[in-house]
Amino acid sequence: MPRKAAVKTKTIYYATGRRKNATAKVRLITGKGNILINNRPFHEYLCRKSCELIIKQPLELTKNLSKFDIVAITHGGGISGQAGAIRHGISRALVNFDPELRLMLRKAGFLTRDPRMKERKKYGRKRARKSFQWTKR
C-alpha cells in the first residue's frame, strides 16, 4: 500500500501599499525570508542600502524577518517611493496575518499612507508654481 506524502500548504497574505505616486501589491508567503520585487531580488532592484532598510523595517520590528517570503509588484513613482509603498504593503499584510501587531506598527508609523503627490501643472505657468521669467522692457 503506497504511503501518502504530507502536503504542506503555504499561507498567503495580500495587501496593497501606496506612497506618493507609487503602488505596491505585496504577498507575504510563509517561507525563509526571500524578497522579490518585480521578479528580481530586492537588493538588485533597489540599488540603495537605505531603501533595503526601509523595506525590512516592519519585519524586523515584529520579528518576522525569516518567517515570510515577500513577492511585491510595484509601479509608479521613483525607487524610494516604491520602497515606501512596499513597506506600507508589508505592514498591512502583517496586520492581516496577526491583528495584534496593528498597535505596534501604528506606533512606528508604518500603517500611515504618505499622501504627498506631485502637484499638477497650471496654465500660464512653466510648472505647478514656477512662472515664466518676467522682463521689464
Image (cartoon, rainbow, N blue to C red):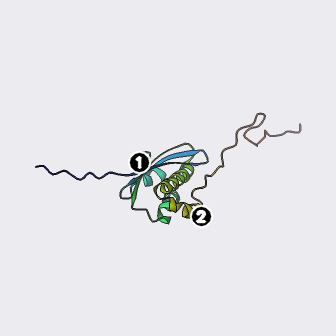
**Rendering coords of residue 100 (x, y %):** 51, 62
**Residue lying at the far top of the rendered structure:** 123
Please give left or right for residue 93 compared with residue 30 in the image: right
Q: Nearer the viewer, residue 82 or 125?
A: 82
**Label 2 element class:** helix
Q: Which residue: 23% across, 53% down?
A: 6
Q: Which residue: 47% across, 64% down?
A: 60
**Label 1 element class:** strand
Please give left or right for residue 93 compared with residue 8 in the image: right
**Residue lying at the far left of the rendered structure:** 1
Can residue 38 be spotted in the picture? yes
Closer to the N terminus: mark 1 or mark 2? 1
Circle 1 residue: 40
The residue under label 1 is which amino acid type?
Arg
**Rendering coords of residue 72 (x, y %):** 46, 48
The answer to the question of whether label 1 and label 2 lie on touching residues, with beta carbons closer than 8 A, is no
Please give left or right for residue 44 compared with residue 54 in the image: left
**Rendering coords of residue 105 (x, y %):** 55, 61
Above/below status of 127 relative to 19: above
The residue under label 2 is which amino acid type?
Lys
**Residue lying at the far front of the rendered structure:** 1
**Rendering coords of residue 77 (x, y %):** 57, 45
- Specify few, some or many for label 2: CA neighbours under 10 Å numbering under 14, 14-19, or 20 or more: few
Q: Nearer the viewer, residue 137 or 77?
A: 77
Q: Which residue: 41% across, 45% down?
A: 39
Asked where in the image residue 132 lies, by quadrant, the reply is top right
Circle 2 residue: 107
Q: How many marks?
A: 2
